[in-house]
Amino acid sequence: MISIILGKKPKLANEENPFSLKFNIKENLIVVLLFISASIAIIFSAAIIYTLFNGSFVFFSEVSILEFLTGTVWVPTEIFRAFGVLPLLSGTILIAGGALLISIPLGVSAALFLSEFASIKLRSFVKPIIEILAGIPSIVYGFFALIFISPIFRDNFGASYFNAASAIFAVAMMIMPIIISLSDDAMKAVPNHLRETSLALGATRWETSTKIVMPAASSGIIASILLGLARALGETMVVVLAAGSIAKLTLNPLDETMTMSAYIAKVATGDIPPGLAVSAGFAVGLLLFLITYVINTIASRIVIQIKTGASVKSKKKQDQKRNILVKILSKFRKAITRYLKIIREKLSKIIYKIFKPKPVSLTKRYWKQRIGITLIGGSIVIAAIFLVLLLGHVLSEGIGGINSTFLTSYPSWKPEKAGIFPVIMGSVYLMIMTLAFTAPLGVGAAIYLNEFAKDTRYTRFLRRIIQNLAGVPSIVFGLMGVTIFVTLFQFGPSLLSGSLILTIMALPIVVVATEEALKSVPDSFREAARGVGSTRWQVIRHHVLPNAAPGIMTGIILSISRAIGETAPILFIVSFFAKSAPSGIFDSFMALPAQIFYWTTQPKEEFHVLAASTIIILLIILLAMNAVAIIIRHRAQAKRDW
Amino acid sequence: MVFFNKILKKGEIIMGFIKQKNVNTLVIFIVLILSIMVLSGCVEENSASLPKLTQTGSSTVLPLAIAWAEEFNNATISVSGGGSSHGLNFLLTKQADLGDASRLLKPSDYEKVGCDGDLVNSDGTAIEACNGVLPTKWVVAYDMLAVVINPENTWATRLNYSQLYEIFTDDYPAIYWDEVMGLNQIAPHEQIEIYAPDEASGTYDYFFEEIIPNWGKDDQQANTRLEMENSIYHPSADDNVILKAIKDNKNAIGFFGFAYYKENPTTVTPVDIAEDDDNYEDASFDNVANYPMARPLHIYTNGVPKSGHVINDYLKYILSKEGQDIIPLVGYVRLSLVDKDLITNQLILL
């Protein structure tokens, strides 16, 4: 067909083989399409950066950056004009830091237990549950923090009505699955011969796991913590619901506080008049974006280091290394490490002389192991208790509200008549459209990156862009969607805008998952197919893709289920009432998580029951999707014959 | 664990049917289900071919707008919040048919979309259209603020504006209840705690506009207590939270829309308010004409809608008895209680 457009008969490279040229044109076209779908990530990132700079331009032309970064008072009213971001920053650090303090010890020890001591049966049971926990939307944690955790702190510790502590606990619960799952992967990746050597030298399993495996996996554990931190910094819904909305320069967890993302949400949903206060929201968004960007970059560097076993440096940087200055520096570093080593050795000798440690008896060492295992096993139990409390509370609140009226009616202003049918349909359409955009784009991008892209500077740039997109706080996507899709493209607050926002959110996850799946197909398959004369696209179409399909589908389903549970990015554009489901892509819509948010903030108790019931419906949908993903993966692993 | 394995096994059985035909079949299966969902959705929409309207704006008007949208049968109206500014902005940029506002149209709303701010009158109407949109104001209901205290609080059941000023602003604020002028003898020596809306809310703006002279102007007399450091002002965007906090704290005071008090009449006590020193007016629907803290709620449309147009019908419905009957149920105040002529004067235009 292309040749007809070009106006001439295709010339065959080989008259005997009628496919020789035809396929080449098709193939080039496909490669170009794949290239475009990979490059779209750059447009998305540019759109985010444009949004943040464009939005905060008014702000920074009136308020100096120094005042913004060092001011200690945040009262962004037109009259008072105190634009010091430090109170917001302290709130963010308090909540993210507090959450890490809880989730690091619990998460890492749970991962250690899972990776080193749990039986295969227990592992195969716990791992999916952790993944499901990671898939629970943050609005559910927010509901839980406000309705369940917050009263505990109020009654027992004299906390204020809103308090950072309840948000800290909810956020800790939220990021724990990330830390457990990634740390576990890192520890599992430690080669077995290290363990065997250690055991052969007479170390107990406890000593092996804490002194050999954990240090060997330390960079992976740190990466998991950094990714958890980035997630905690960008978290919006929990904080909006539970932590309050006053920007205070305080680190007292019993006090109320406001984070950067909460301020952005406030700008988007409140009655703030147009002007400096709104522009300040974009400025805060920019700062939040930069902070998470730095953390994510460090984390992804570490992850790449683990995966490739070497530090990744572009050629330019290696050239720089030959600089004299760098050489001197590296010599310094070597000298310092040598001195440190000597000092350490001397120190340990002195310590030995002072304390004269006696050899510890084997019984004692085994006791130590027993206590250790019990403790880290306990952290799994604690995580399980959290989960049971969360689900139990939501179930007991909401199960009574689910009946046929609830499932078929519209969200009426009379609680007894209210239902969520149009809302479910809104979420389903959102899901379908997001799927329709994400699947071809994400899979295309991953195929290009994994199968066609050469290791050029552009490819590396693309990879970095996609990785960074994955770490952008969800509320920033909301700002971007309103600026770009709703206002600039004139799509309005419609289903189309909503699904495009979620597409950008889900895209990086799909790309990463698809790449993993493609990589898992052995190269010998490709070589064999190429060897019998297939073109590169034929290889991918008939040999790589079918074998990678289960992995790709799992990735797509999981990313869509993540996207569908998101509240913050679509909170700006949903409409809070419509009798019927949307019928066109330019129609306004309502989605389940936003409905939960709306009902949670309503005065009548009955609406809270409705919110809990809606949570149950949302969780059922997400669990079903997760279950499908798990089954697909499980089956594929069983069927795999290579 | 056994349970989970069972689930996996069941999945295996389901998948077993598809097993022979490879994963492709599963893809087709999923696509089929999805397309059935889409089709069923489309079929259902076709039956309800009513005109569509979009209404957006003030979160104060939102619950009322939702109720009207539900009860009005001649159109499918989708309602969203986002604030008065958002609503007026969307009306002026033709992204919404109706813009809700708990305040009047301001010159800054015109300026934001590139029109001359001088075209806006002080009563919230406009002399000339902006980008082909002439924002036209309709007063649809009244919002009443309730200043509320804990039921156990016996000393602050009536307050005037200067006492409220002492409690809620940073201008020589009262820290303890017995420091409030006029309450020295009857109030205990306990710290005042304020639970009230945050500065993003229209209610906050409205309250302080009432009690702080020159609010929002360059010579604003005081700042709100929220803007003090280490303040005892606990703001919340959620009125329900405020209600609970005041219920739990004997020394708490706060304010919110009368709607929230109406829902929970026993949990908190409303305070009688006097604008000058001692004309205390009790907070109730019947007394709204005299009560100092009541404000009109507006819906803005593009020009006066022509007779027979669905927006015209909608406004007529809102001003009708049926429409107005909903207002007290949501917790706001019907127009006739404030000004008997307001409804007839507006209906003449339609």
Image (cartoon, rainbow, N blue to C red):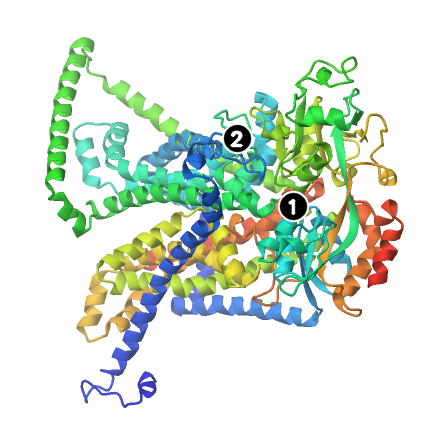
Residue A596's spot in the image, x, y percent? 61, 47
Q: Can residue A133 be seen in this snapshot?
A: no
Q: Nearer the viewer, residue A254 or B13?
A: A254
Image mark 2: chain: A
Q: Amino acid at mark 1?
A: Trp
Find the residue positioned furthest to the right.
B340
Q: Nearer the viewer, residue B241 or B211?
A: B211
Q: Nearer the viewer, residue A552 or B90?
A: B90
Taking the spot 26% from the left edge, 70% from the top edge, the residue there is A539
Question: To which residue does mark 2 refer?
Answer: A164
Taking the spot 73% from the left edge, 65% from the top edge, the residue there is B75
Taking the spot 41% from the left edge, 35% from the top edge, the residue there is A66
In the picture, residue B148 is in which quadrant? top right
Residue B265's spot in the image, x, y percent? 79, 34
Relative vertical location of residue A136 with respect to residue A511 in this rendering, above or below: above
Tell me the element at label 2. helix
Taking the spot 20% from the left edge, 13% from the top edge, the residue there is A357
Residue B95's spot in the image, x, y percent? 61, 61
Q: Amino acid at mark 2?
A: Ala
Q: Quadrant of the N terminus of chain A?
A: bottom left
Question: To which residue does mark 1 refer?
Answer: A599
Image mark 1: chain: A
Tell me the element at label 1. helix
Q: Nearer the viewer, residue A146 or B17?
A: A146
Q: CA distance from mark 2 to mark 1?
A: 22 Å
Q: Earlier in the sequence, mark 2 or mark 1?
A: 2
Classify mark 1: residues with Cα within 10 Å, few (<14), some (14-19) or many (20+). Answer: many
